[in-house]
């Protein structure tokens, strides 16, 4: 999305209270994803070992998210969003990374672990993205501030996994659960770097909308071929699916608007609320209070949130000199 720097202060979206409340709303939406998916498994009656039906559910969600994102983005832009012909390759790559890869593992994971645990572990994508952007894509430099933030954040992830001893012993850590969520975070990290790179050539909301749409179709068809099914047993199934589609469409569209009218650092700083909302909403909607408010849960969440804050603090000019 093109940034018109001179017009930022002339719009309501650049006012701090509006920016904060909109970012908070986006984080509430993203934070509600884990509870919504786990609730979907219950009302659609999809057992943990029914991988095909989970894939179909993910596909249906992101197909709807793609339609909604394109619609919302077109309304905001006052024109129908359509990728340039040369941008379809970007859409294809992003759909494989951000939707097919990330959410195949994300949906798998939540069938085996709690929403609280998933929300905290998934936040590792924020730190993996920084490392990948610096070490693989060479898009920015690893500064002392970023390294410190990553160390603090990863400490929180390690803590929720039982510490180094717990990880070494295996404990309650499984590939289908915690391992799959870490894989989802890794796919998120790569897709974040690709979006940053491809957004130089195409509107990021357009990229998100069409990659959701394409990725959703791929997931749904793959799940159907594998023998999955989605049975709408009540109106709750319809409402849940529509809401899950809106989570991505509404959050990505509004976040894109905030990035258009505000400096990136001003918006990104609010990202620490994502895992916080995920944990609080899992405690409220899923009844996971014991884990959410345990010493391990609270300390892990605080470390992860602190890490996100540290890496997104607006750097001094000297610190930012080598970054793109």
Image: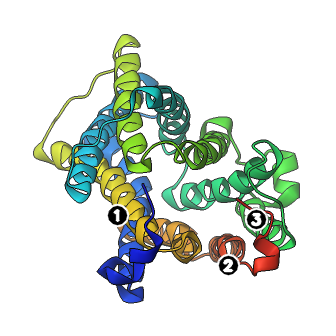
Report which quarter residue 257 is drawn in: bottom left
Q: Earlier in the sequence, mark 2 or mark 1?
A: 1
Q: Is residue 32 visible?
A: no
The residue wearing badge 1 is 254
Q: Are marks 3 and 2 in contact (CB under 8 Å)?
A: no
Quarter containing the N terminus: bottom left
Q: Which residue is mark 2?
A: 313
Of tags 1 and 3, which is closer to the observer? 1
Is 63 drawn above or below residue 76 in the view shown? above
Residue at position x 75%, y 47% from top?
132
In which quadrant will I find the C terminus? bottom right
Residue, disc 3: 159
Nearer to us in this view, 18 or 176: 18
Sequence-wise, the earlier of marks 1 and 3 is 3
Which structural element holds mark 2?
loop
Left or right: where does residue 82 sit relative to residue 31?
Answer: left
At mark 1, the secondary structure is helix
Give me the residue at 39% from left, 66% from top: 26
The residues tagged by marks 1 and 3 sit, at their Cα atoms, a distance apart of: 33 Å
Residue 258 place in picture, x, y as percent: 41, 69
Who's the residue at 23% across and 49% down the image? Answer: 74
Residue at the outermost left position: 235
Categorize mark 1 by other alpha carbons within 10 Å: few (<14), some (14-19), many (20+): many
Q: Position of residue 224 (x, y in %)?
A: 33, 16
């Amino acid at each position: 999305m093109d940034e018109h720097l001179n017009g930022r202060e002339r719009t309501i979206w650049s006012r701090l209270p509006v920016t904060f409340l909109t970012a908070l709303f986006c984080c509430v939406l993203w934070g509600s994803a884990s509870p919504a998916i786990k609730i979907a498994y219950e009302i659609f009656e999809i057992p943990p070992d029914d991988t095909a039906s989970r894939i179909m559910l993910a596909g249906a969600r992101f197909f709807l998210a793609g339609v909604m994102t394109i619609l919302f983005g077109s309304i905001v832009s006052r024109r129908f969003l359509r990728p340039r012909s040369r941008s379809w390759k970007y859409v294809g790559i992003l759909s494989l990374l951000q939707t097919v890869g990330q959410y195949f593992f994300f949906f798998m994971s939540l069938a085996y672990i709690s929403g609280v645990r998933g929300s905290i572990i998934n936040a590792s994508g924020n730190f993996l993205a920084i490392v990948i952007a610096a070490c693989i894509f060479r898009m920015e430099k690893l500064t002392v501030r970023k390294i410190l933030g990553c160390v603090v954040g990863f400490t929180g992830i390690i803590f929720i996994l039982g510490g180094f001893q717990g990880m070494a012993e295996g404990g309650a850590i499984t590939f289908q659960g915690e391992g799959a969520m870490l894989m989802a975070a890794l796919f998120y990290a790569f897709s974040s770097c690709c979006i940053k790179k491809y957004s130089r050539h195409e509107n990021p909301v357009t990229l998100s909308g069409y990659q959701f749409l394409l990725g959703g179709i791929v997931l749904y068809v793959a799940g159907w071929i594998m023998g999955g099914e989605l049975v709408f047993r009540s109106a709750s199934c319809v409402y849940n699916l529509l809401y899950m589609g809106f989570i991505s469409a509404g959050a990505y569209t509004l976040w894109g608007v905030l990035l258009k009218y505000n400096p990136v650092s001003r918006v990104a700083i609010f990202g620490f609320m994502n895992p916080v909302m995920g944990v609080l909403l899992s405690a409220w909607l899923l009844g996971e209070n014991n884990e959410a408010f345990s010493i391990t849960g609270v300390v892990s969440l605080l470390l992860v949130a602190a890490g996100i804050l540290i890496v997104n603090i607006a750097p001094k000019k000297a610190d930012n000199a080598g970054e793109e």
